[in-house]
Amino acid sequence: MHMIHETRLIFWSHLRANLRNPAWAVIMLMQPLLYLVLFGPLLENLGGAYADGSDPWLVFTPGMVLMIALFGSAFAGFGLVAELRSGVVERQRVTPASRNALLLGRVAKDMTVLVAQAVVLIGIAIAAFGVRPDPLGMVATLALVALVGVAFASASYALALKTRSEDGMASTLNSLTVPLLLLSGILLPMTLAPGWLEALSRINPLSHTVDAVRAMFASRFDTAEVVTGTLVTLAFAVVLGYVGTRTFQRENA
Amino acid sequence: MNQPAPVITARRLARTFQTRTGRVEAVRGIDVDVQTGEIIGLLGPNGAGKTTTVRMLTTLLAPTAGDATIAGHDLRHDPRGVRSRIGYVAQGGSTSDESLVLEEIILQARLFGIGKARAKANATALLPSLDLDGLEHRPCRQLSGGQRRRVDIALGLVHQPHIIFLDEPTSGLDPQSRANLWEHIRKLRTDGVTVVLSTHYLDEADALCDRLLVMDHGTIVADGTPDELKRRISGDIVTVEIDTTAMAGSGDTASSRSDRAASSPESARSTPGTDATVRAARQAVDVRSVLVERNRVHVTVEHGDQAVVPILRALDGAGIAPSALTVKRPSLDDVFLSLTGRSLRDSDENRDRGRAGGMTSEPETGTPAVSHP
């Protein structure tokens, strides 16, 4: 009960700060938006190879939504490094507030911003490129985006507590996010990959999320992809969320 | 004076850090007792273990050995209980550039479980008392160093704690902001708040603290009021100034306190006036040591204030009319020097790398006792 209240306090405080200075949220939206506008049109002429004859935008847009989920949340820890340095975290640590609340309030804020960014991105895709996603699939996609956000934001905060420096964060994140991106099929479906590469991509939980989101965008709900993708994403969020709270508790001794 | 139960008790509290170069014993088993309503100072050079001690007592750092009870809560077994009773102001500040003053203070209060309305009332009441009114909706990056430091203090006080820990509260502040902050800290004592502050400023420890724990190399090397410490170590210095019109020169004679010999060497002649003064002082009181400097005679005695009248009578009897007579307590730097063999100023120059502010000079604590026209 206390923890929920304290999580809400941290959540609102961070969300207000974000709204006062929305530049970062807009910058994070730029990358997938540029891909959508400057890369997406190339796919229209790829024909059957890319989307198996269906609308390529219906395949590409959910990928971009997940790209925002990955990059937006994986870099969340940078904010925490700044907070650690300014003494804000330590100041909150001497309050009796739950250690989990200090983490979860921040994660909940990141999740909210991500979902808002995803809505903007899908809105632009609908308006500019005539994408017609399944409405229910779209809502379910936002739920999965939120889970991916929980997973990567928690991991990113744990990393921030461990490294306590932007440099340490940047090198670790770069060596993780690029393989995660390439092995997820976010840009091009992994069905194009040779056998070994496709097998490798299956290790990446994000590749299952991408499959599920694409299926739901195209109203294919009763498929194995949706079930597997949802379960894998959920498990991923639980595991990394646990890692994050454990790290927060330990580092806050 | 009645002795209430101590509000902080620490026994054999220790913290060891493991670094690449080996074990570092930051704090080596210290005992601390703090009474309610005291302003207690942890004084020592950087690296003495002050911050580590404060961080242990505020639950931020787990001790590697020892126990402590703070406001009735056990540090090891009930850190949450400890946290609910204390306020803490960190050395390096506690605000981010973008946060808004009032909003941040209210958030802090609410994290202590205080309701929205009361949090706002507390914060709003606190701002004018810390001269922060009018800055409610400013982002912290727009504040001056002194203002931002006072926001830190407000953040540490908004939940009305019984005990507040201030780690180097005036470090890096200009003299005016420091004096201003001292006033605020004294006001806390009036309100019954127990204040534990760490400092490496001698004047701050002297002017502000009821009691000092002098720390060096992770241990407490002395414990007492600033006056007690100074009296115990060095005694007081009574300075007799003799009318110069009657004297031609001056000179250094007995100089047991070489650190105080500030006279120039070119005048080597001792004057009858100063010699007679030394003789008179020795007759009148128990003199520990004497230093003659130009037309001034410094005599070190046990109790300076009690020595003034006998010395004055003796001088009168010897036909010497001093132009001024002052009593000066030894400085805390003298105390630190005698305890550790090092001057606190020297230790600081060696360790104070790039810190804003740096050392401030110690003010003259001398008080003119008698003065002839």
Image (spheres, coloured by chain):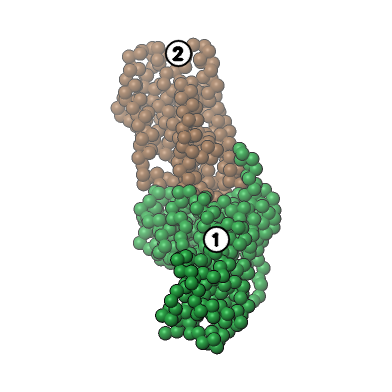
Q: Residues within 10 Å of mark 1 (few under 14, many from 20)?
A: many
Chain of the residue that carries numbered disc 1 in the rendered image: B
Identify the residue at horizontal 36%, vertical 42% (top origin). Answer: A22
Q: Is residue B35 above or below residue B354?
A: below
Residue appearing at x 40%, y 64% in the figure: B176
The part of the image, by quadrant, that contains residue B291 is: bottom right
Q: Can you give x and y, in whole percent of width and height, for residue B84 in the image?
A: 58, 57
Residue found 67% across the figure and 68% down from its top: B5
Left or right, B207 with reference to B18: left
At mark 1, the secondary structure is: strand
Distance from label 2 to label 1 (Cα)?
Answer: 66 Å
Q: Which residue is mark 1?
A: B197
Pointer 2 local density, CA inside 10 Å: few below 14, some 14–19, many at least 20:
few
Image location (x, y in percent) of residue A86? 46, 48
Image coordinates for residue B266, horizontal then vertical, percent: 45, 66
Q: Is residue B57 left or right of residue B172?
A: right
- Quadrant position of residue B301: bottom right
Seen from the viewer's position, the closer of residues B277 and A74 is B277
- Foreground disc of the pair 2, 1: 1
**Chain B colour as displayed:** green
- How many labels were placed on the picture? 2
Label 2 resides on the chain identified as A
- The amino acid type of the residue labelled 2 equals Leu
> Could one spot residue B363 in this view of the protein?
no
Q: Identify the residue position indicated by label 2 in the image.
A: A192
Residue extending furthest toward the front: B269
Callouts 2 and 1 in the same chain: no
Q: Position of residue A29 (x, y in %)?
A: 37, 33
Q: Amino acid at mark 1?
A: Leu
Chain with brown colouring: A
> Residue, x 31% and y 23% (percent of image)?
A38
Circle 2 — which element?
A: helix
